[in-house]
Amino acid sequence: AALERKVGQLTMELDLVKKTPRLRLVSDNENLSIVTGPKPAPFDGDVR
């Protein structure tokens, strides 16, 4: 019974460890943005 409890505890800890880095990465990098795509058209100054 003790072994089954230990396996359950380690399983829950492992699930938590797997989820935690993802949440931390999002909060650490929330101010960083990488925008990719075609370059904007050149501006010729003729905007009305």
Image (cartoon, rainbow, N blue to C red):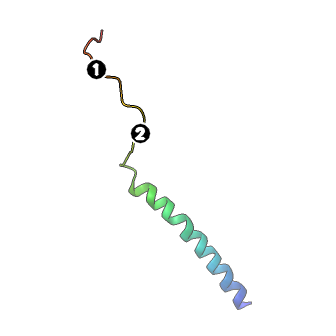
For the residue marked with disc 1, what is the amino acid?
Phe
The relative height of residue 28 versus residue 32 in the rendered view (above or below) is below
* Residue 43 place in picture, x, y as percent: 28, 20
Residue at figure coordinates x 59%, y 74% from the top left: 14
- Comparing 13 with 43, the one in front is 43
* Residue 23 place in picture, x, y as percent: 49, 59
Residue at figure coordinates x 26%, y 16% from the top left: 44
Secondary structure category for the residue under label 1: loop
- Hey, which quadrant is residue 42 in on the image? top left
Q: Name the residue under label 2.
A: 36
The answer for how far apart the CA atoms under marks 1 and 2 are is 19 Å
- Comparing 20 with 38, the one in front is 38
* Residue 26 place in picture, x, y as percent: 45, 55
Q: Which mark is residue 7?
A: none
* Residue 30 place in picture, x, y as percent: 40, 50
The relative height of residue 30 versus residue 9 in the rendered view (above or below) is above
Is 12 placed left or right of 44 in the picture? right
Given the current orientation, which residue lies at the most extreme right position? 1
Location of the N terminus (image quadrant): bottom right
Q: Name the residue under label 1.
A: 43
Q: Which of marks 1 and 2 is nearer the N terminus?
A: 2
Location of the C terminus (image quadrant): top left
- Hey, which quadrant is residue 2 in on the image? bottom right
- Comparing 33 with 31, the one in front is 33
The relative height of residue 36 versus residue 46 in the rendered view (above or below) is below
Give the class, few, some or many, for how many residues have Cα within 10 Å of label 2's Cα (few <14, many ≥20): few
For the residue marked with disc 2, what is the amino acid?
Thr
